[in-house]
Image: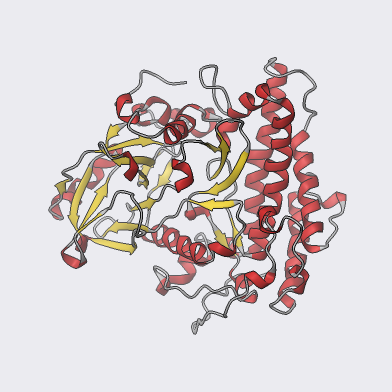
């Protein structure tokens, strides 16, 4: 899958085993490169910086006075991660990393701002998203973090981080973090606590993303969902390795984790907490035991794609009372992706589910069929549309278990995502008309938070004051 490796392979050896395994998945277990890396669209992009071609490279980093940036949030205290702040207040400086391919676009800004190269070498390795880098100071791998940079090229489109995107990501990260204790234990997050944008180049910001402690656990296997299916002979897909090791356990993983647990998790997040994830194979990660591939936890990264049902959260009296970046432009920052239809809860729900069905479930079905035809697994091991049918059944069952609502077979996800979401919208309207304590949720299932259901008594808070009323944006 890779050409002669660019950069330093030795530098990657500084990282612990868990992060090294994660980088192998991010670089060599990519899925559908023909779709996501069409170099025909941009023959000028330097292919050395594609993750499958790249080892660790010195990341261009500059110390620049804070006054030259719009800064949102602050780094979490009490962590070992690399600090991006040098000094306090207006006299302090900020460490500003730039993707090497975008460096020419910043020359004027760097000159005008009196930038100085950082005194410490920072190593960086591209992840599957290319613009997001795993970075650490030379010799200090315990300080590693993710840096989301700005890129704008035909291969990947406009991936620049504007004021709106940076503010929204940092703001939503703080919203979720405030209510983290009430969310299902089965889901963890890669927090985005700080981001900043040059005042002279307001479409070219940076977001700092923390690496969860669970990713540093050297007994863990950290696997983006796409890596379950992507790879080659040198780097076999993770699920194929699972299947060849224990066919029964691999099948149970698909049915119980990819289908059942995710269905309950998605319904809990969307219908109880009003948090609607961008549910595709790059933003969703699973942690597994490195010994036997047993499931540990889901993780979500990239708050830029998270959508919020603000009406539902207000109705359930979930506290959202912290100051948010760019609150003066609340609607354009938090209420929509920039066009009116995107503010509709229906749109948010159907987009999230369609991503999971298209990029995860149906990709599994397509790949399993291909593996059977190519002899990688025994013919007949999986029926056609096996996982689509399993996920559809599990989602309908989860709706019944959590809300007592029966989904007709004709309206199941496998038959029609649109009709299924219409059913959810009808359920949502009933819930919004009920009293805030939502007694329908007062009896938790046997597995409680582990399966994704949270008793209402544990998520009810005090109504947040919002004199402007700007948090009510959905039109249902």
Residue at 23% in and 44% down:
61
Q: Is residue 116 visible?
A: yes
Residue 273 place in picture, x, y as percent: 62, 65
**How is the structure coloured here?**
secondary structure
Is 13 positioned to the left or the right of 271 in the image? Answer: left
Of 257 and 199, nearer the camera is 257
Residue 269 place in picture, x, y as percent: 63, 59
Q: Is residue 346 visible?
A: no
Is 39 positioned to the left or the right of 428 in the image? Answer: left
Residue at 36% in and 43% down:
151
Residue 28 place in picture, x, y as percent: 48, 26
Q: Quadrant of residue 372?
A: top right
Q: Residue furthest bottom?
A: 467
Residue at 27% in and 53% down:
84
Of 3 and 419, nearer the camera is 3
Q: Quadrant of residue 419?
A: bottom right
Q: Is residue 230 above or below residue 165?
A: above
Is 219 positioned to the left or the right of 279 in the image? Answer: left
Q: Residue furthest top?
A: 375
Q: Quadrant of the C terminus?
A: bottom right
Of 279 and 180, nearer the camera is 180
Of 146 and 115, nearer the camera is 146
Residue 177 place in picture, x, y as percent: 49, 62
Q: Is residue 71 above or below residue 350?
A: below
The mark total stands at 0
């Amino acid at each position: 899958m890779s050409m002669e490796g660019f950069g330093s392979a030795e530098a990657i050896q500084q990282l612990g085993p868990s992060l090294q395994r994660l980088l192998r998945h991010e670089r060599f277990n990519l899925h559908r490169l023909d779709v996501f890396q069409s170099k025909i669209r941009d023959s000028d992009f330097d292919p050395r910086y594609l993750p499958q071609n790249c080892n660790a490279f010195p990341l261009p980093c500059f110390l620049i006075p804070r006054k030259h940036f719009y800064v949102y949030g602050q780094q979490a205290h009490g962590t070992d991660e690399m600090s991006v702040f040098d000094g306090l207040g207006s006299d302090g400086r900020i460490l500003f990393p730039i993707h090497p391919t975008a460096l020419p676009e910043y020359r004027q800004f760097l000159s005008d701002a009196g930038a100085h190269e950082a005194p410490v070498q920072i190593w960086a390795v591209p992840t599957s998203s290319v613009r997001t880098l795993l970075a650490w100071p030379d010799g200090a791998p315990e300080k590693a973090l993710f840096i989301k940079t700005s890129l704008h090229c035909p291969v990947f489109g406009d991936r620049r981080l504007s004021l709106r995107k940076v503010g929204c990501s940092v703001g939503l990260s703080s919203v979720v973090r405030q209510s983290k204790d009430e969310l299902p234990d089965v889901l963890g997050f890669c927090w985005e606590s700080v981001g900043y944008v040059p005042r002279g180049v307001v479409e070219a910001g940076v977001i700092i993303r923390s690496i969860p402690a669970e990713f540093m656990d050297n007994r863990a296997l950290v696997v983006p969902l796409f890596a379950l299916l992507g790879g080659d002979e040198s780097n076999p897909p993770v699920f194929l390795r699972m299947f060849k090791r224990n066919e029964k356990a691999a099948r149970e993983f698909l049915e119980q984790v990819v289908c059942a647990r995710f269905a309950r998790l998605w319904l809990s997040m969307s219908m109880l907490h009003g948090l609607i994830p961008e549910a595709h194979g790059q933003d969703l990660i699973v942690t597994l035991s490195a010994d036997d591939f047993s499931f540990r936890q889901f993780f979500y990264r990239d708050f830029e794609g998270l959508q919020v049902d603000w009406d539902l959260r207000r109705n359930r009296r979930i506290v959202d009372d912290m100051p948010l970046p760019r609150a003066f432009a609340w609607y354009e920052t938090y209420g929509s992706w920039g066009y009116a239809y995107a503010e509709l809860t229906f749109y948010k729900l159907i987009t999230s589910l369609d991503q999971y069905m298209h990029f995860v479930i149906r990709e599994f079905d397509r790949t399993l069929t291909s593996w059977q035809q190519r002899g990688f697994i025994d013919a007949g091991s999986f029926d056609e549309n096996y996982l689509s049918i399993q996920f559809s059944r599990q989602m309908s069952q989860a709706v019944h278990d959590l809300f007592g609502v029966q989904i007709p077979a004709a309206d199941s996800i496998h038959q029609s995502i649109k009709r299924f979401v219409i059913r959810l919208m009808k359920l949502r309207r009933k819930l919004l008309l009920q009293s805030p304590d939502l007694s329908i949720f007062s009896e938790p299932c046997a597995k409680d938070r582990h399966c994704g259901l949270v008793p209402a008594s544990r998520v009810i808070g005090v109504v947040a004051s919002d004199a402007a009323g700007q948090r009510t944006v959905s039109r249902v």
